[in-house]
Image (cartoon, rainbow, N blue to C red):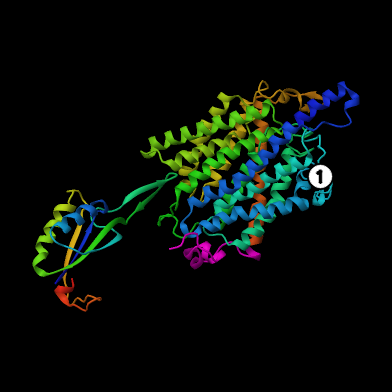
Amino acid sequence: MKKIEAIIKPFKLQEVKDALSEIGVHGMTVTEVKGFGRQKGHTEIYRGSEYTVDFLPKVKIESVLPDNLVNQVIETIIKAAKTGKIGDGKIFVSSISEAHRIRTGERDESAV
Amino acid sequence: MSAEAAAGGLSHAEKFLAIPQAAAMPALDSGDNAWMLASCALVLMMTAPGLILFYGGLVRAKNVLATMMHSLILMALVSMLWMIFGYSMAFAPGNAFVGNPLTWFMLNGVTGAPNPAYSSTIPQETFMLFQMMFAIITPALISGAMAERIKFKGYVVFILLWVTIVYFPLCHMVWGQGGFFNWALGGKVPALDFAGGTVVHISSGISALICAIMLGKRHGFGHEPLMPHNVVLSLIGTGLLWVGWFGFNAGSALTAGTLATSAFAATHFSAAAGALSWAFVEWRHKGKPSVLGAASGMIAGLATITPASGFVSIPSAFLIGLAGGVVCYFAVTKLKAMFNYDDALDVFGVHGVGSAVGMLMVGWLASAAVNPAIASTFQANGVAVSLAGSARQFGNQALAVLFTAVFAGVVTVILFKVVDLLIGLRVDVEDESIGLDLTQHGERAYSE
């Protein structure tokens, strides 16, 4: 099992979710996050005072998947979330050792 | 305002001279009284919800309640002082600098009968209420400079002293009978200040600047973003301030006649001009016309016209508003940066600087066609002197501005030092970082 963490632009969330549903990803956790990478922040001006806002709003999608789905999911996310401009985000993949479904007690791949 | 009141009083007096048997009892005018009671309510509305929303939106979310409380509590505290001795200190006969606090102690003697010195057609009680609303909003304006770091206990004591030692006497000097700068009631230097350029805006503006400097900058000033938490609140506040200002300025006619209309019109067109000029300059200078900028320009236009409304034509008012928007824009951007003080909500840059511009401009734009009383009311050595725009009147205005700034400034320095030593005026760094809402009042504006 792998966990995919994709940090994307907030306005791309719906497209990514729809594209993942289509290829059979049936669950995910979404969090509103803030951060910066190469895009840096932006400037806001209040009564002439300029403030640099370092942390930009992003959305983090987390999903735990069977190994065989991982490559397809990564391709799908890249395709749906890409605008080609700086700040499109990143995808991280990590290994998961166990999974449990609380209601039934099922384990691992049948639990995700 | 008392100036016009006096002008009204004089014209009545003249009528009574013509018909001596009518002189005994000036007639109340229910139309005038209706407008003045409405104006009282409008001016109170400027403090809450006008100013509390305007200021509350400009601070961070952890300080919004405390910032609103700084103005809100004055509606109670200053009203109490006003009842006990404030009105009497400001408007009772006394010397050139202060009224006798015992004359109308506990408002004894302030009744439904008019006081012809100020207004012969409304109850003195109405006049007292109207003036009280000014005494409430003036110290509330100062609180903006101390926002986000002032200790509540010290603040309350400081303001009580400030209102008593700065506001009541200054009010007497400019608007009170026999006041030093009163142009219509026996003053020495005739300064035209229709609705409070000196008494309200310059006194609070200069005191705010001094408090900001003495209190020190907010923690993180200059390297952390200290941004408004809700500009929408500030915009709602701006709208309420503009509407309330009609009571402030047009109400200062103390009658519901043509002078009130003239002051109303001047107020409106100056606010419009201030918004346009601030937005235009900011657009050129920073690349975008910010909404908060347009709103700040409106307030600048309103503060600038305050002393001049009731004395100037509509085009003059528009010109005054244009000047106010531009000058205040540079005061809050350039001047503040140059001297590096943290006037958190720009009380000095908008109110102090704006009203100084208005006070000076009325010195050359005051028109006897708009307000005939200024042509002949003031007398020097028994000879009537016109106060319409001239180099001499400009000098009188400048003197009033300078005196107000020095008087309010010096007293503020002393009061600040004393209260800071005895009680303390600044919260410690930890409380400042947690926020004043929680540390000073035990509350939070927004649930998590």
Per the image, label 1 sits on a secondary structure element best described as loop
Location of residue B56 in the rendering, given as x and y in whole percent from the top left corner: 51, 52
Relative horizontal placement of residue B301, taking residue B131 as reference (left or right):
left
Q: For this rendering, which residue is in front, B266 or B332? A: B266
Relative horizontal placement of residue B398, taking residue B14 as reference (left or right):
left
Which quadrant holds residue B396? top right
- Quadrant placement of the N terminus of chain B: top right
Count of all numbered marks drawn on residues in the image: 1
Location of residue B120 in the rendering, given as x and y in whole percent from the top left corner: 79, 33
- Quadrant placement of the C terminus of chain B: bottom left
Q: Residue at x 70, y 37 (%)?
A: B36
Q: Is residue A39 visible?
A: yes
To which chain does the residue with label 1 belong?
A: B
Q: Amino acid at mark 1?
A: Val
Residue farthest toward the right in the current orientation of the protein: B21
Which quadrant holds residue B427? bottom right
Relative horizontal placement of residue A92, taking residue B194 as reference (left or right):
left
Location of residue B277 in the rendering, given as x and y in whole percent from the top left corner: 47, 33
Q: Is residue A96 above or below residue B447?
A: below
Q: Is residue B216 visible?
A: no
Q: Which residue is mark 1?
A: B110
Q: Is residue B430 magenta?
A: yes
Q: Which residues are magenta?
A: B420-448
Q: Is residue B22 magenta?
A: no
Q: Residue at x 79, y 47 (%)?
A: B88
Mark 1, Cα crowd under 10 Å, few <14 / some 14-19 / many 20+, is many
Q: Is residue A57 above or below residue B97?
A: below
Location of residue A27 in the rendering, given as x and y in whole percent from the top left corner: 21, 64
Q: Residue at x 51, y 49 (%)?
A: B345
Q: For this rendering, which residue is in front, B56 or B199? A: B56
